[in-house]
Image (cartoon, rainbow, N blue to C red):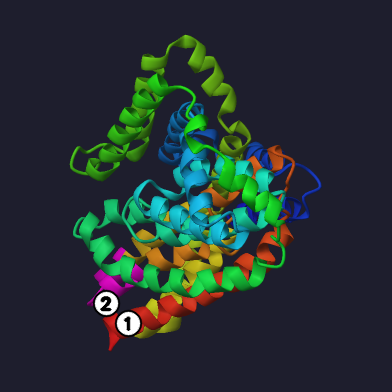
Amino acid sequence: MEQQAILAIGIFLLTYGMIIAEKVHRTIVAMIGGVLMVVLGVVDQDSALHHIDFNTLGLLIGMMIIVNITAETGLFTYIALIAAKKAKGDPVRILVSLVLITAIGSAFLDNVTTVLLMVPVTFSITRQLRVNPVPFLITQIIASNIGGTATLIGDPPNIMIGSAVKELTFLAFINNLAPVVVVIMAVTIPIFVLLFRKQIQTTPELKQKIMLINEKEVLTDRKLLVKSLSVLGLTIVGFFLHQMLHLESATVALAGAFLLLLLTGEHAMEEAFTKVEWTTIFFFVGLFVLVSGLVETGIISKLAAQAIELTGGDPLATSMLILWLSAIASAFLDNIPFVATMIPMIQEMGVMGVGNLEPLWWSLALGACLGGNGTLIGASANLIVAGMSGKAGHPIKFVTYMKYGFPLMLLSVLLASIYIYVRYLI
């Protein structure tokens, strides 16, 4: 067993180093890392498949299809142009309005869907203004993870915690997490303006050009627009009701996607499938199998047991440890497998006699969701934006993103620590 554990850590660290170095595409690196875990016998193929979170993959594929078909109608460009005209064509004000749209969208769609909608729109506006799209994309990644923290359906870790702890309902998430999310956004937006305003200057002529665009002209296919909006609306209602209906969010997304394909015909299907970000999907598959090696060899549960030993079960120390451990770990690991390991650990603490588990659940949710902002591989939304941006010829470098994301992540977790202490532990 010990030998397997050392092997698992070795493969994991080597793969990680390669992903950070960016010499080879991260999808190839992650898939080879995952394959090595199976080939070298750290996990067998059945266990590896068992660790792949098909709910996440199904949700991604379903929403990518719906979003790509809807994007053809020009709807998202229309929304963004209205926002850009309201901001009088000023890049800094446009950046702020796109950040707000992303944060609110992430709470009620989910952060992955929201960035899929926002990125193409951002490209079309930045092309008009001839400014670098990267500052817009970095701020949207950060806003999507903060906004997604506010609700049960906003971020995969919340979905998992809500499924595991029945008393944490849709409304309980909003009631306990939305207030601190509003505070974090209010602090973060002025920082975005300070950081990026110099990088996104444009000329008065180009601002004027934005004001002259007739946004109604971008709505190209009204019939398709009605079909897409109807299906998108149904899918969002499905997300709200998915627990009552006992359906996983992936089922809702895929049902919506294939309903829309049924309404639009075979030609649309070929087109929609070519636009799915398969490189991102396979990156996730590799990542899940990679982490399965750490789970199966007991490395993650050993870390959990040591965590309890450290705090001696004190509510304040335990909450802070879970919050900060989740945040730092989620910056470097995908937060989904991490949360999957932490849930039984917190339930075990309840059995061991820790009385009030509620602050621990909210600490886990805040740490895992906000921690995703730390690096480019911390959360699904980050990877998808990076993938789309690279495809459009504006690669976001791992280190460039981390320079902004990591300090802002630490700030948001600090605000969350104060909130947890004041609201639950005094």
Instruction: Examine the image and state in which quarter residue 251 appears.
Output: top left
Q: Label 2, on which residue?
A: 354
| Residue 38: in magenta span | no
- Considering the numbered disc 2 on the image, is that residue within a helix, a strand or a loop? loop
Q: Report the span colored magenta.
A: 347-363
Horizontal relation, residue 145 to residue 360: left or right = right
In the rendered image, the residue lying farthest to the top is: 266
Inter-mark Cα distance, 2 to 1: 8 Å
Q: Label 1, on which residue?
A: 315
Residues tagged 2 and 1 counted as in contact (Cβ below 8 A): yes
Instruction: Examine the image and state in which quarter residue 362 appears.
Output: bottom left
Instruction: Name the amino acid type tagged 1.
Output: Pro
Along the line of sight, the residue nearer the viewer: 355 or 134: 134
Instruction: Work out whether residue 285 can be spotted.
Output: yes
Instruction: Work out whether residue 5 can be spotted.
Output: no
Instruction: Name the amino acid type tagged 2.
Output: Val
User: Looking at the picture, how far across and down is residue 210, in whole percent?
Assistant: 60, 46
User: Looking at the picture, how far across and down is residue 407, in whole percent?
Assistant: 61, 73
